[in-house]
Image (tube, rainbow, N blue to C red):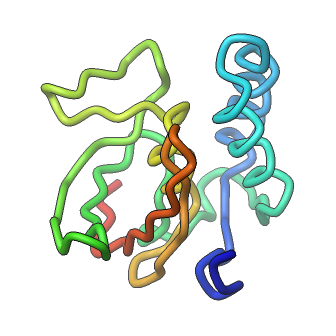
């Protein structure tokens, strides 16, 4: 089990929180593993009024640059809802393991997440653009 510091604080706007709760409920049957993980992240989130999330925190539709700590590979993606996902365009759904891990994490923080095969990975958020 990864160390607790690899599960940093998660901060969400009330608008994102409400939308994501609905997404978790709607996807529970079709995507149970990711839905459960995202639901757990929502449970531990600090929810603030919309507009009060720091610009360095990953929110929906934010452009995020992160590093995979196992490979050193740096990627930049935009975090979107499933209907907007397009990997070729760099748009990653929040209803993927990596998307669920990114939401609410601040720049400079690392988080442990699990691939669909159950492999633990660590990524570090390097930059967030709202």
Residue that appears at 52% across and 71% down: 111
Q: Residue at x 39, y 41 (%)?
A: 79
Residue 113 at x, y percent in the picture: 54, 59
Quarter of the view holding residue 107: bottom left
Q: Quadrant of residue 95?
A: top right
Q: Is residue 53 left or right of residue 33?
A: left
Please indicate whether residue 31 sits to the left or right of residue 79 in the image. right
Q: Can you say whether 90 is above or below 57 in the image? A: above
Number of numbered callouts drawn: 0
Foreground pick, 49 / 65 = 65
Q: Nearer the viewer, residue 114 or 18?
A: 114
116 lies above or below 83? below
Is residue 42 rendered to the left or right of residue 3?
Answer: right
Q: Residue at x 33, y 64 (%)?
A: 128
Q: Position of residue 92 (x, y in %)?
A: 35, 35
Question: For this rendering, which residue is in front, 33 or 12?
Answer: 33
Q: Residue furthest right?
A: 43
Task: List x then y, in percent, for residue 87.
Answer: 23, 28
Residue 17 is situated, as x and y percent measured from the top left of the image, at: 73, 42
Q: Indicate the quadrant containing the N terminus: top left, top right, bottom left or bottom right.
A: bottom right
Q: Is residue 7 above or below residue 43?
A: below
Q: Is residue 75 left or right of residue 91?
A: left
Which quarter shows the C terminus?
A: bottom left
Q: Nearer the viewer, residue 60 or 113?
A: 113
Residue drawn at point x = 15 percent, y = 28 percent: 89
């Amino acid at each position: 089990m990864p160390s607790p510091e690899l599960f940093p604080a998660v901060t969400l706007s009330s608008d994102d929180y409400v939308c994501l709760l609905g997404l978790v409920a709607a996807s529970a049957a079709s995507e149970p593993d990711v839905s459960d993980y995202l639901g757990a992240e929502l449970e531990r989130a600090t929810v603030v009024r919309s507009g009060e999330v720091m610009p360095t925190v990953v929110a929906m539709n934010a452009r995020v640059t992160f590093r995979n700590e196992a490979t050193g590979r740096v990627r930049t993606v935009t975090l979107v809802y499933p209907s907007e996902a397009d990997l070729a365009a760099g748009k990653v759904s929040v209803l993927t393991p990596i998307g669920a891990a990114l939401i609410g994490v601040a720049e400079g923080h690392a988080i442990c997440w699990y691939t669909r095969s159950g492999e633990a990975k660590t990524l570090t958020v390097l930059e967030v653009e709202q």
